[in-house]
Image: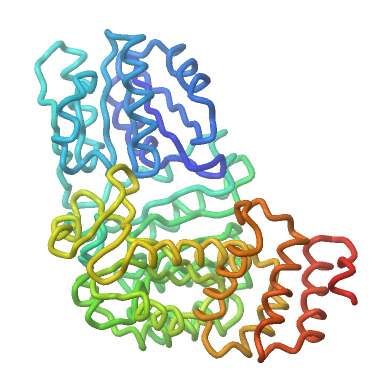
């Protein structure tokens, strides 16, 4: 009996770890398993044709907030073409509030939570012609499964491969699905390092191993042991970890300081510096301590640092978010401005009416307004996020921003002003503005600021243009 496991990824550089978690348990039960991965940019007609050609007995769809709408369309259409095939949905986006799918009779079953045990059990029932529940709970084993890296020969062609050394999170943030499960399960240090060595033998152009662990350093000593081992030159990849800044100790800082530049990326969640907001979000951190730790890592100069903020959290007005932004700015290589999403299964979703939340009715359920922030203000923050992505995250304006950062009285005011200026200057989407025009608009906006010395900024912009565009700077930068 053939089982097709299907994923829609955000882009070609990504791969779906969930499919690989299910493959071996199904194969041990004697099923023929085929993995099919596409991206959201692929044409639906091509995806359908590829799935249809398999004529599988069972199709499993891996559902997330970024792909659920497309998955439902593809699944329903495939069912109309292959009515005898069974359609099974799984993944975080279908694991909660399953009554949403009651009026979709083409869905044969939904696997909630972890699927390594539930999916083979369901497929056995189908193979044997036995009855089964439409909603299956995956359960939560006491220990972490130990099945290696799950990628096989020929599957290393994405520039990012994913690895899971632990499941669960020690924290219970009210906006995060990790709060829906309790406890943390971890692979041993020895097994984790053996797995990371196995990535060295994967053929393909993989450059980054991204740990999907929610809090990699939940066990501080284990994290330090793994980082210490990764200093060895036998580990040649780049490694991305989500970590808790408050758990870093002096040994952590000492080990991390020894890495060659670019080998390690660390992502930290700050989300807000407003104590009332953090308390309402069940996020028990001390913002000053987090910022100090993140800044210490950043100032080492050898580790690429991401720092996250979330707009739309409880009790955070537009003005108070501006303060959180200013508090966090300059502490990292990348300041990621995210937006609260009211995910099914989270406590903030349950408080939607109490907090006056209005959000998109379909995935990704992005918050549009609340008691504390208006729709117009949230849209202003979205525009600022787009400008940050173009100018800060692209890292194509490093010299200019190095100069501007040292001068600006308020980082938030600067980026808000640039966003407003661009909105007045050009009607086309920011992403479609040419690179020379992006330089020109930054210069024009900066001329309106009394603290900017134009010739100094022009020199910095010329350096950026020459470095990243590989051509002579345009005349408006040289004049």
Q: Position of residue 341 (x, y in %)?
A: 31, 56
Taking the spot 50% from the left edge, 63% from the top edge, the residue there is 383
Task: Name the quadrant containing residue 259.
Answer: bottom right
Quarter of the image containing the N terminus? Answer: top left
Residue 110 versus residue 437: which sits nearer the camera? 437
Query: Is residue 187 visible in this depiction of the protein?
Result: no
Query: Is residue 133 visible in this depiction of the protein?
Result: yes
Task: Name the quadrant containing residue 409.
Answer: bottom right
**Residue ranking furthest to the front:** 424
Residue 112 versus residue 271: which sits nearer the camera? 271
Taking the spot 37% from the left edge, 84% from the top edge, the residue there is 249
Is residue 39 shown left or right of residue 164? right
Residue 135 versus residue 265: which sits nearer the camera? 135
Is residue 396 shown left or right of residue 263? right
Is residue 479 shown left or right of residue 410? right
Quarter of the image containing the C terminus? Answer: bottom right
Is residue 59 shown left or right of residue 439? left
Q: How is the image coloured?
A: rainbow
Residue 31, compared with residue 165, is above or below; it is above
Residue 156, compared with residue 322, is above or below; it is above
Q: Position of residue 281 (x, y in %)?
A: 22, 70
Taking the spot 76% from the left edge, 82% from the top edge, the residue there is 457
- Count of marks overlaid on the render: 0
Q: Position of residue 373 (x, y in %)?
A: 30, 69
Residue 261, compared with residue 111, is above or below; it is below
Taking the spot 57% from the left edge, 65% from the top edge, the residue there is 387
Q: Position of residue 344 (x, y in %)?
A: 21, 49
């Amino acid at each position: 009996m053939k089982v097709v496991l299907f994923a829609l990824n955000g882009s070609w550089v990504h791969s779906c770890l969930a499919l690989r978690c299910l493959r071996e348990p199904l194969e041990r039960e004697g099923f023929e398993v085929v993995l099919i991965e596409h991206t959201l940019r692929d044409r639906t007609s091509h995806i359908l044709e590829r799935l249809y050609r398999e004529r599988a007995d069972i199709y499993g769809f891996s559902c997330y907030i970024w792909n659920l709408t497309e998955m439902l369309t593809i699944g329903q259409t495939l069912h109309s073409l292959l009515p005898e095939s069974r359609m099974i949905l799984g993944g975080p986006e279908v694991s909660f509030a399953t009554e949403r799918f009651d009026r979709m009779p083409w869905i044969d079953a939904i696997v909630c939570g972890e699927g390594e045990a539930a999916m083979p059990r369901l497929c056995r029932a189908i193979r044997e012609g036995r009855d089964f529940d439409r909603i299956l709970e995956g359960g939560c084993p006491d220990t972490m499964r130990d099945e290696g890296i799950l990628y096989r020969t020929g599957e290393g062609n994405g520039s990012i491969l994913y690895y899971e050394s632990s499941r669960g999170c020690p924290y219970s943030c009210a906006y995060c699905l990790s709060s829906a499960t309790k406890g943390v399960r971890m692979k041993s240090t020895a097994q984790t390092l053996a797995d990371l060595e196995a990535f060295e033998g994967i053929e393909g152009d993989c450059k980054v191993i991204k740990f999907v662990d929610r809090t990699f350093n939940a066990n501080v000593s284990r994290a330090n042991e793994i980082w210490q081992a990764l200093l060895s030159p036998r580990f040649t990849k780049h490694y991305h970890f989500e970590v808790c800044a408050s758990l870093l100790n002096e040994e952590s800082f000492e080990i991390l300081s020894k890495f060659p530049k670019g080998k390690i990326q660390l992502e930290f969640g700050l989300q807000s510096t407003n104590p009332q907001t953090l308390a309402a979000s069940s996020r028990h951190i001390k913002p000053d301590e987090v910022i100090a730790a993140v800044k210490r890592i950043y100032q080492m100069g050898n580790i690429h640092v991401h720092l996250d903020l979330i707009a739309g959290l409880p009790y955070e007005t537009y003005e108070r978010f501006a303060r959180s932004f200013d508090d966090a700015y300059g502490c990292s290589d990348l300041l990621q401005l995210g937006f609260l999403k009211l995910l099914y299964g989270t406590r903030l979703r349950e408080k939607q009416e109490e907090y006056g939340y209005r959000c998109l009715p379909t995935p990704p359920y992005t918050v549009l307004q609340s008691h504390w922030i208006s729709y117009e203000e949230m849209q202003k923050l979205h525009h600022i996020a787009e400008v940050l992505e173009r100018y800060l995250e692209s890292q194509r304006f490093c010299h200019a921003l190095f100069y501007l950062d040292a001068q600006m009285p308020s980082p938030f005011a600067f980026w808000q002003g640039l966003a407003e200026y661009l909105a007045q200057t050009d009607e086309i989407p920011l992403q479609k503005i040419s690179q020379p025009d992006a330089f020109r608009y930054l210069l024009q906006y900066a001329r309106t600021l009394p603290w900017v010395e134009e010739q100094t900024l022009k020199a910095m912009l010329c350096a950026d243009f020459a470095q990243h565009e590989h051509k002579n700077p345009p005349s408006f930068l040289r004049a």
